[in-house]
Image (cartoon, rainbow, N blue to C red):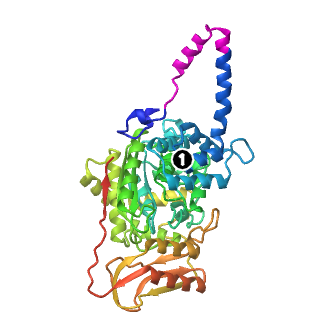
């Protein structure tokens, strides 16, 4: 449908579709023609069918994209169908074939019409939530609109854990469909699984009960929600095919559109720790996300924010949960983390009609934090989804057995950080995945991270490593020292901008 196209894109650039009324009329007319004509038509149809079938073979679709040609809706649908078809059944795509098309897409890209078609097909590969349904309506209750937030990923990006209960405390309903770590970045579900018993894959009745109780529920997509993305996501993670604007767009929005949202904010990361390292690429992705969402009828706004250094003081699953609990409970808050969380939350309240303007939204959010209302919503969510019964006082987070400081090799100012390398250190410690399905050690990671511009004396810690053993800790210390650039004392450090909103 043309209303699925990005806002402002001319309809004549979409793939042509057959009008069923026209087809029916043509068929009726054809019955009055001579037998010879009918026979010729049948022959032509048979020939077309015979020649069309090979175009849907995986190898031919891969070849077409490899050679830089656009895929039509049928070919894209065949790919998505192949993602969800059971192994051994007709149309199934093997992992190697999926990885090959993903790589061809990374190298050759997709036109806007292809991105829209892929997003639409992946959205419809499973269930699409309808919040007017009786069971879902009971879960929402008398709360406000159904809202969500998504980040393209970074190091130490734990905003979702605070934003969901914060927006819920201000009247929003936040069924947040989240993902696992991807490449060098952490995943919200992995963080929450550091809380013993927390069920990220809760059955619908359970997460709906949590939503009714807390106003928010952070869960995985579930087997029936955009299942095509679940498989493609896992394969991209281990085949170096994460950094693709069309694949990122389709992955994010297929889950969000399937969730039936009424408002969405996007946090698109840029900098050397982001998948879109260049600011212009991040802005292009932000615009594409907003346009494709608008074409599907979802109000969405996107903010480009900095990932040239870790966000917050920690990176690693249990450590990040602990930092979020400190923020929610008013014990401590890293300034950049708090500011970004409030900025995204405020815009979401405005989108949902829960605040008159930015100032009103910020005031409401401050009250929800200061009063403990947001913390209480988080506690209700965790308890309802099987986590610790009193998470605010006893989160039961496991601690790594080995802790080592990362000493500054000499006096200086922290002038630059290879943030991607920092993320890979966390993966190497066991806090992320090097291959699909790999178990994660929730205990490991980094804490007490110093920000860009910090002055350090020789031997003073750049950060602290939490590791499973001494050998892993020592390797991490060396890698982190190499990832940090210390300029001479007194060198001015120009900090990246805090972020800006991108319009379609």
* Rendered image quadrant of residue 122: top right
- Seen in the picture, residue 494 relative to 214 is either above or below; the reply is below
Residue 309 included in the magenta stretch of the image: no
Percent position (x, y) of residue 97?
Answer: 65, 52
Residue 437 in the image, given as x and y percentages of width and height: 64, 62
User: Badge 1 local density, few (<14 within 10 Å), some, or many (20+)?
Assistant: many
- Placement of 142 over or under 365, stated as above or below: above
Does residue 245 appear in this view? yes
Which sits in the foreground, 354 or 309? Answer: 309
Q: Nearer the viewer, residue 414 or 39?
A: 39
- Number of numbered discs present? 1
Q: Nearer the viewer, residue 431 or 7?
A: 7
Question: Which residues fall within the magenta stretch?
Answer: 16-38
Instruction: Say which quarter of the image contains residue 100.
Output: bottom right
Quick check: 450 left or right of 494? right
Q: Position of residue 223 (x, y in %)?
A: 62, 48
- Prevalent SS, magenta region: helix
| Residue at x 45% of width, y 58% of height | 152
Classify 501 as above or below 44.
below
Q: Which residue is mark 1?
A: 208
Q: Is residue 311 left or right of residue 438?
A: left
32 is within the stretch colored magenta: yes
């Amino acid at each position: 449908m043309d209303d699925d196209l990005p806002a402002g894109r001319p309809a004549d650039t979409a793939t042509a579709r057959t009008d069923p009324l026209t087809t029916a009329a043509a068929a009726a007319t054809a019955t009055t023609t001579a037998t010879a004509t009918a026979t010729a038509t049948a022959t032509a149809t048979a020939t077309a069918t015979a020649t069309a079938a090979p175009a849907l073979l995986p190898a031919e679709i891969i070849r077409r994209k490899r050679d830089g040609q656009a895929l039509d809706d049928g070919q894209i649908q065949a790919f998505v169908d192949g993602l969800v078809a059971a192994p051994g059944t007709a149309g199934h795509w093997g992992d190697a074939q999926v990885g090959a098309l993903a790589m061809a897409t990374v190298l050759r890209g997709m036109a806007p019409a292809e991105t829209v078609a892929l997003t639409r097909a992946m959205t419809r590969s499973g269930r699409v939530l309808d919040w007017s349904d009786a069971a879902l309506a009971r879960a929402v209750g008398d709360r406000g609109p159904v809202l969500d937030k998504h980040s393209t990923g970074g190091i130490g990006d734990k905003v979702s854990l605070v934003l969901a209960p914060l927006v819920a405390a201000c009247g929003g309903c936040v069924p947040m469909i989240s993902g696992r770590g991807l490449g060098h970045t952490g995943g919200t579900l992995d963080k929450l699984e550091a809380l013993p018993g927390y069920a990220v894959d809760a059955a619908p009745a359970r997460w709906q009960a949590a939503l009714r109780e807390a106003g928010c529920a952070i869960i995985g997509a579930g087997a029936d929600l955009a299942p095509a993305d679940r498989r493609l996501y896992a394969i991209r993670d281990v085949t170096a095919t994460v950094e693709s604007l069309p694949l990122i767009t389709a992955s994010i929005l297929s889950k969000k559109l399937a969730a039936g949202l009424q408002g969405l904010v996007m946090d698109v990361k840029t900098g050397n720790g982001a998948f879109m390292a260049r600011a212009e690429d991040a802005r292009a992705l932000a615009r594409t996300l907003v346009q494709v969402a608008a074409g599907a009828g979802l109000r969405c706004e996107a903010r480009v924010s900095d990932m040239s250094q870790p966000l917050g003081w920690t990176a690693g699953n249990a450590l990040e949960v602990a930092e979020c609990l400190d923020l929610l409970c008013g014990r401590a808050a890293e300034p950049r983390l708090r500011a970004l969380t409030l900025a995204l939350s405020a815009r979401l309240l405005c989108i949902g009609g829960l605040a008159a303007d930015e100032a009103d939204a910020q005031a409401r959010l401050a009250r929800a934090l200061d009063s403990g209302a947001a913390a209480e919503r988080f506690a209700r969510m965790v308890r309802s989804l099987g986590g610790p019964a009193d998470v605010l006082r006893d989160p039961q987070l496991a601690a790594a057995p080995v802790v080592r400081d990362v000493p500054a090799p000499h006096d200086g100012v922290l002038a630059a950080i290879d943030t991607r390398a920092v993320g890979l250190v966390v993966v190497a410690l066991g806090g992320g995945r090097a291959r699909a399905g790999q178990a994660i050690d929730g205990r490991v990671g980094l804490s007490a991270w110093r920000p860009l511009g910090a002055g350090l004396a020789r031997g003073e810690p750049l950060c602290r490593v939490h590791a499973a053993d001494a050998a892993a800790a020592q390797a991490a210390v060396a890698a982190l020292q190499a990832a940090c650039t210390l300029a001479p004392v007194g060198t001015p450090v120009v900090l990246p901008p805090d972020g800006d909103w991108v319009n379609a």
